[in-house]
Image: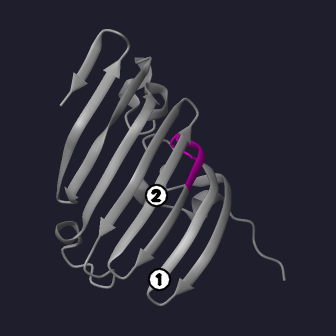
Amino acid sequence: HSFPKRRSSDLFPSHDTSNKTFNPNKLRLTDINLVLSIDLLNKDSLSAKILSLSAKDISGLHVNNISTKLAASTKQLYMPYINVELPNSHILLENILVRYDSLANSKNFDEKVKISLPIKSSHIAFSDLMAFAPQLAEAHGVVKFKGEISGRISNLRLKKIEMAYGSSLSLKG
């Protein structure tokens, strides 16, 4: 069979390639590399490892590597760590816990899901945030941070937060 040639704009007509801001509803990923190991998969449980995941989005977001382990059941998801590496940033989360009544019942999802997201010593460069906030194009430097995000998705709280930008600005709370 012979198929007619099509441009990407024909296949993705709603994707505006001129917009360089990250939009999770219009992902356009390239250079995707995934190494995944599924240890257990049945109707009520999952145990898996993402040994390596990298990708680039048209917005300019480049993920050098994401790695994690996870164990999920009908009531919760546990990840001992998530390691995220961007070109100039490193984010480490440990002992992540997500609790929910049921994945099948997504009504009022943001009210029902509780998370605990401890952020270990991490740093993020402004250059890696430009896909989310192009206004940061002129900003330089790195923000170091750690703390914990917890609560229901609709009402998240920051606890034990520590942030530092250079040697002149720091925040603890």
Q: How many dots with numbers?
A: 2
Colour scheme in the image? one colour
Q: Which residues are magenta?
A: 56-67
Q: Is residue 71 above or below residue 93?
A: below
* Picture coordinates of residue 162, whole percent (x, y): 28, 29
**In the figure, is residue 23 to the left or right of 6?**
left
Which mark is nearer the camera, 2 or 1?
Answer: 2
- Give the residue at mark 2: 80
Circle 1: is it few (<14), some (14-19), or many (20+) Cα within 10 Å? some
Q: Quadrant of the C terminus?
A: top left
Return the residue nearer the eye: 131 or 54: 54
Q: Quadrant of residue 60?
A: top right
Please name the predominant secondary structure of the magenta segment in the image.
strand
Q: Name the residue type under label 2.
A: Pro
| Residue at left offset 62%, top offset 76% | 39
- Among numbered discs 2 and 1, the one appearing first in the sequence: 1
Residue 80 is inside the magenta segment:
no
| Residue at left offset 52%, top offset 41% | 61
Can residue 19 be seen by looking at this rendering? no
Q: Is residue 79 above or below residue 20?
A: below
Q: Name the residue type under label 1.
A: Ser
Q: Quadrant of residue 109?
A: bottom left
